[in-house]
Amino acid sequence: MTKRSLESLPGSALEGKRALVRVDFNVPLKNGVVTDDTRIRAALPTIAYLRERGARVVLLSHLGRPKGGPEPKYSLRQIVRDVEKLIGAPVEFIEALEPGVAVTRRLPRGGVALVENTRFWPGEEQNDQALAQQFAALGDFYVNDAFGSAHRAHASTEAVAHLLKPAVAGYLMERELQYLGAALDNPRRPFVAVLGGAKISGKIDVIQSLLPKCDAILIGGAMACTFFASMGLEIGGSLVERDRIDLAGALLKGGGQKIVLPRGATVAPTLERAAERKQVPSDKIPADMSVFDIDQATADDFRARILGAKTVVWNGPMGVFETPPFDAGTRAVANALVEATAKGATTVVGGGDSAAAVAGLEDKLTHVSTGGGASLEFLEGKPLPGVMALDEA
Ligand code: ADP
Ligand code: MG
């Protein structure tokens, strides 16, 4: 199912009109200063497109997790300067909704306004109709470019899209749906998924959704240990989900040859005692050690399988990549994806920690999703409310 795009709107629908644009400006702040403006930059193509066509742009976003009321540390006022610098134009700040309508009407062609944190209104997270109506009054049509918030049915992402038409997908949203969607619905084969991270529980639905679609699922991270445990292997002090061991066993039975587990692991007594680390086969994990990464043999195996694929989807690091040297396996997989991309494969990375693990390599991969939780739910095959609510193409 394809959603109506921004580009499908005729010039007359843009010229002089107020575009209400839901963006994801949920940026990290330290003492009121934006420490990473990636998310703001990600929305620039949509904003520029609208302004160039004479639209007036009214931006909506949430920031952090305020408790249903204004909290200075979560005010979007703090980022107005950054947005102005990146857009290269002044930005009107709208603190209250009703007077805000007048502000949006006064905006010049190409003018930009930023509304206060949507979560300062208690109705936002309840997907409240009345609040959505107030948001809708700020614009003449709706654009959702906040893929990272699309898995939540909130007033600014879902309800408003039913009230303000046309409701279309911005460039970032479109790109996310295109790459994630194509990988899942119509993959060039072989299609290999690489899954890692801490917990099997959060990824079960991903495994179940991907199993029938892909040709192989390579498992790394602590998640592999729950699979090892289901096979009766010693896993020492590794992170394991005891209550998911049976489930892991059932997946192995059902998944047959498709599930590829690590051949071996990099183990150490503790994360701090990295100097004592060693590489062991998966059936030789010492009882007094823990798995913190895949081993070299597994990295080589996974690399070969990734290079043999035409589509690769990756979610979840292979080890405790935040703590070198246990980042080696994750780096190896990242490099294998880069190599595969250079050879013509489609490579898609989703997940917050996974995206962090490939920071700096974005240009060498087909697509790195900006939506952590949203990309995961997409991979699980769940409909995203913020996407569903947009007009059909
Ligand atoms: P994503 O955010 O990409 O979906 P997850 O949140 O599922 O990824 O997993 C990331 C976390 O998994 C990281 O914090 C990493 O340290 C942890 N992790 C990976 N392998 C292991 C391991 N063997 N032991 C403990 N933690 C691990
Ligand atoms: Mg995570």
Image: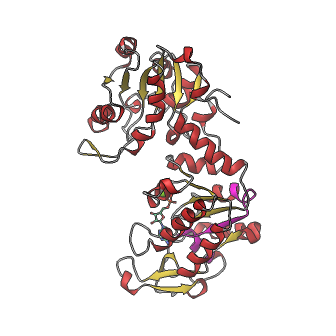
Residue 285 visible in the current orientation = no
Task: Identify whether 101 is placed above or below 195.
Answer: above
Q: Is residue 157 magenta?
A: no
Nearer to me, 348 or 315: 348
Residue 2 image position (x, y, % from top left): 68, 35
Residue positioned 41% across, 40% down in the render: 41
Residue 59 image position (x, y, % from top left): 42, 27
Task: Identify whether 323 is placed above or below 274.
Answer: above
Question: Hey, which residue is sitting farthest left in the picture?
Answer: 31
Residue 244 image position (x, y, % from top left): 61, 66
Residue positioned 57% across, 74% down in the render: 225
Would residue 203 be found to the left or right of residue 270 on screen? right
Task: Identify whether 178 is placed above or below 97.
Answer: below
Residue positioned 55% across, 38% down in the render: 173
Residue 60 sits in which quadrant? Answer: top left
Nearer to me, 381 or 109: 109
The quarter in which the N terminus is drawn is top right
Q: Does the magenta stretch include residue 218?
A: yes
Would residue 18 be found to the left or right of residue 303 on screen? left
The quarter in which the C terminus is drawn is top right
Residue 117 image position (x, y, % from top left): 37, 31
Residue positioned 23% across, 45% down in the render: 31
Nearer to me, 243 or 371: 371
Q: Which stretch is magenta? A: 209-228
